[in-house]
């Protein structure tokens, strides 16, 4: 009986104008302590960029870099079946609505 080896992926590289995002855990409670029901639909979610495509890396007009924390709209996010908890998504740049920064670039 021949054994078949399953291929394991070492990394996922987004193509085109996309980023690979690790989605943050959904919040079950607001900062004020109000519990959110499981059915509460949040139209945007946060995550951290794991990898950016070469196209984005070379585009000075797109201010996204690896490890940036972002806010994105999940409608066109494509889940990556790469991990058991499935927290990875390929997200089009158009669906990234904000980047969280520590300092204001105008403060130079």
Image (cartoon, grey):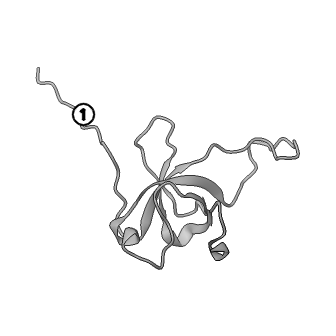
> Relative to 32, is 20 on the left or the right?
left
Name the residue carrying label 1: 6
Q: Give above or below for 33 relative to 54.
A: above
Q: Quadrant of the N terminus?
A: top left
Q: Quadrant of residue 13?
A: bottom left
User: Residue 40, how many percent across, how many down?
Assistant: 76, 50
> Relative to 14, is 71 on the left or the right?
right
> Relative to 12, is 37 on the left or the right?
right
Q: Quadrant of the C terminus?
A: bottom right
Residue at position x 82%, y 47% in the image: 30
User: Residue 97, how many percent across, how many down?
Assistant: 61, 69
The residue furthest bottom is 61
Q: Give above or below for 6 relative to 82.
A: above
Residue at position x 30%, y 42% in the image: 9
Q: Secondary structure at mark 1?
A: loop
Rate crowding at label 1 as few (under 14), some (14 to 19) or many (20 or more) other CA atoms within 10 Å. few
The residue furthest front is 108
């Amino acid at each position: 009986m021949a054994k078949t080896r399953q291929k394991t992926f070492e990394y996922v590289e987004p193509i085109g104008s996309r980023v690979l995002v690790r989605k943050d855990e959904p919040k079950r409670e607001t900062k004020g302590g109000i519990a959110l029901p499981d059915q509460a639909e949040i139209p945007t979610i946060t995550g951290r960029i794991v990898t950016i495509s070469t196209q984005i890396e070379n585009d000075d007009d797109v201010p996204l870099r690896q490890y940036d924390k972002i806010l994105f709209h999940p409608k066109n996010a494509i889940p990556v079946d790469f991990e058991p908890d499935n927290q990875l998504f390929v997200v089009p740049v158009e669906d990234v609505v904000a980047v969280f920064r520590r300092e204001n670039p105008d403060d130079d």
